Amino acid sequence: MIFFDLFITFFKIGLFGFGGGYGMLSLIQHETVERAHWLSTSEFTDIVAISQMTPGPIGINSATYCGYSAIHNAGYGHLMSVLGSATATFALVLPSLILMILISKMFMKYMHHHSVESVFKGLRPAVVGLLAAATLLLMTPENFSTPSDNLWQFCISCFLFIAAFVGVKFVKINPIRMILYCAVAGLLLLYE
Amino acid sequence: MIPLIEEEVVNRHRWVEKQEMLDLIAIAQSCPGVFAINIAIFIGYKLNKVRGAIATAAGTALPSFLIILAIAIFFKQFEDNRVVAAMFRGIRPAVVALIAVPTFNLGKQAKLNKLTVWIPILSALAIWMMGVSPIWIIILAGIGGYCFGKMRNE
């Protein structure tokens, strides 16, 4: 039952999704691409791109889109796919709802306890690793092509990767603008 | 996002005091889940218990949900369009770079030293090369942090 599986998957992502939207990405990637094969790597990358360009939290955006695509790719129609995105988004929010209410109700005073703080401290370096993994997992032939498959596309992809990294990190170009530049570059250089 | 929430919740509606807000932000950021949703639930619960929490969570999620849903339905029909396909071939490498940037920024913020720098490297390799679930990395890191904190206190 794909809807039940979708619910459990995004509930898990909501429960263990530490480190903000980006930290959550490697979880979403692992669950939806590697484990369940609901999406291909390039579809997942497209979802991240679309989430980046639209307002709102990246976690909600990708859950909504993944839920829709997963059901759609399984061969269902639009209505069922909408239900799929509602299921994924609800499942992602539910652990937050339960946890934050429990914290408000009775654990607020423990949140600054040193054992709780040391757990959070331990998570911080691991979240950096999660982000690094998300980056590495997306460096695939699907996203970059390969030198033997299509040398031109591979070189352009590597150039755009470096240009986007330098542009956003050092030149401080707005990420959305950077995505738009690369879309234009893709249209001019990679049209087939 | 934080200035926007603060403006509405603290300055305009005065639902929460400034100091309490800072505390809630810190907790919502440490907890799992989407930050904006977490903070919305805290404020909703404070105002009107469980009903309030459900209302603010739904209110925060709904705009993004509807926008993305519209895009998903729209995009599914243009996926095979050659212009759209070419644009996304250019966008994909950039998106990977956009995830690489916060990796380095977060690494700097985490103030890694010679010893702790191995934690992100080994976790990334375990996920990337061995297909270990990130959930196990989170669980292990939490337990590790707890044990380390215990040891330091004794």
Image (tube, coloured by chain):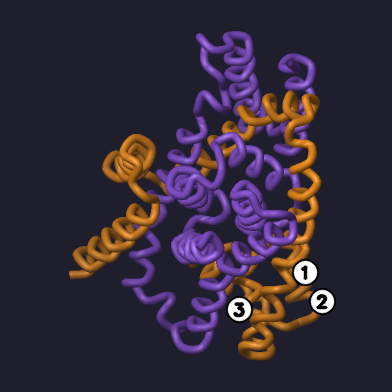
Chain colours: A purple, B orange
- Which residue is labeled 3 in the image? B42
Which quadrant of the structure image shows residue B58? bottom right
Which quadrant of the structure image shows residue A182? top right
Q: Position of residue A27 (x, y in %)?
A: 47, 51
At label 2, the amino acid type is Arg
SS at circle 1 = helix
**What subunit carries mark 3?**
B
User: How would you rate the neighbour count of disc 1 (Cα within 10 Å): few for under 14, some for 14-19, many for 20 or more?
Assistant: few
User: Mark 3 or mark 1: which comes first in sequence?
Assistant: 1
- Which residue is labeled 1 in the image? B7
- Residue nearest the viewer, comparing A145 with A105: A145
Left or right relative to B49: residue B73:
right
Left or right relative to B131: residue A67:
right
Callout 1–callout 2 Cβ contact below 8 Å: yes
Q: Position of residue A142 (x, y in %)?
A: 55, 27
User: Mark 3 or mark 2: which comes first in sequence?
Assistant: 2
Left or right relative to A113: residue A47:
right
- Residue that appears at 37% across and 50% down: B133
User: How would you rate the neighbour count of disc 3 (Cα within 10 Å): few for under 14, some for 14-19, many for 20 or more?
Assistant: many
Q: Which quarter of the figure is the C terminus of chain B placed in?
A: bottom left
Q: Which quarter of the figure is the N terminus of chain B placed in?
A: bottom right
**What subunit carries mark 1?**
B
Share a chain, discs 3 and 2?
A: yes
- Residue that appears at 51% across and 88% down: A105
Residue A158 in the image: above or below residue A62: above
Left or right relative to B41: residue B79:
right
Q: Position of residue A45 (x, y in %)?
A: 60, 38
- Which residue is labeled 2 in the image? B12
